[in-house]
Image: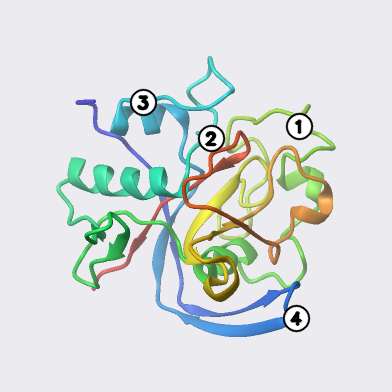
Amino acid sequence: MGTTTHIDLTPIPPGQVTLTDRRTQRSWSVGLAPFRLGTLPVTQDQYAQVTGERPGTAQGDGRLPVETVSWRDAVLFCNSLSQQEELTPVYDFDAQGEPLLRGPSADGYRLPTEAEWEYACRAGTGGPRYGPLDDIAWHRGNSGERPHEPGGRLPNPWGLHDMLGNVWEWCWDLYDPEVYGTYRVLRGGGWFDEHWSCRASVRRRSHPTFRVDDVGFRVARSTTS
């Protein structure tokens, strides 16, 4: 717990991304300021160094992506890592214990927004993926139905690894509050998914306390001037 946790962050330039929802046939554009995103998903070792806990079903190799973590677990990790590095935590909590954003003055770690995630995943490419699936992602067809150490597949043009496949990644956003209430967004596909789920545009939803063995996360930080 006293060990400093190092997480590589990749700078992401400003830009715009158009998101689509297949269920509702809705699309919307989002303008983005520059930010930094984890080059890799958070690993078991990194999670343990910050929280003292080592969740996950794939035990024995701390370099594997952490999984079996809920959205709420990921938010608490971000605040704990911020405090460890003497940064201002991004999240506060209301009277019911629900996370709230502190605002632009907070310089700590956070979950990426859904728009940030897709924009970073695409990295300027226009297709469903940033490369041939077997070259860039661990999915059901090549994973042996287990997670793998992040970084073993080719990165996208901005140097981010495992944006598709390996583990699904939590984003900050509510999925569709009018229909699904507090359910949050998951992106990227995982080691157990068929090829059609490992695409830049695919959206998945789950309850913020949900934990399963193909869901993890990566962290982001806003870029301060």
The C terminus: image quadrant? bottom left
The residue pinned by badge 3 equals: 53
Give residue 192's quadrant in the image: top right
Q: Which mark is first along the chain, 3 or 2? A: 3
Disc marking residue 163: none
Residue matched to label 4: 25
Q: Residue furthest left?
A: 86
The amino acid pointed to by label 3 is Glu
Q: Nearer the viewer, residue 180 or 64?
A: 180
Q: How many angstroms separate mark 4 from mark 3 (CA)?
A: 40 Å
Marks 2 and 3, Cα distance to the nearest angstrom? 12 Å
Q: Earlier in the sequence, mark 4 or mark 2?
A: 4
Which amino acid type corresponds to the residue marked 1 in the rendered image? Ser
Kind of element beneath mark 2: loop
Residue 180, placed above or below residue 62: below
**Quick one: label 3 or label 1, which is nearer the N terminus?**
3
Which secondary structure, mark 4? loop
Q: Quadrant of the N terminus?
A: top left
- The residue indicated by pointer 1 is 143
Tell me if I can see residue 74 in this picture: yes
Q: Please, is residue 147 above or below residue 124 in the view? A: above
Compare marks 4 and 1 and give the one earlier in the sequence.
4
Considering the numbered disc 3 on the image, is that residue within a helix, a strand or a loop?
A: loop
Expressed as whole percent of the image width and height from the top left, the position of residue 206 reads 58, 53
Q: Amino acid at mark 4?
A: Gln
| Disc 4/disc 1 C-alpha distance (Å) | 31 Å
Q: Image point 42% across, 24% down: which residue?
A: 54
**Residue that numbered label 2 is attached to:** 67
Q: Secondary structure at mark 1?
A: loop
In this rendered view, identify the residue nearer to me: 16 or 173.
Answer: 173
Measured from the top left, where is residue 179 in percent x and y? Answer: 60, 72
Asked if the residues shown at circle 4 and circle 1 are in contact, with their CB atoms under 8 angstroms apart, the answer is no
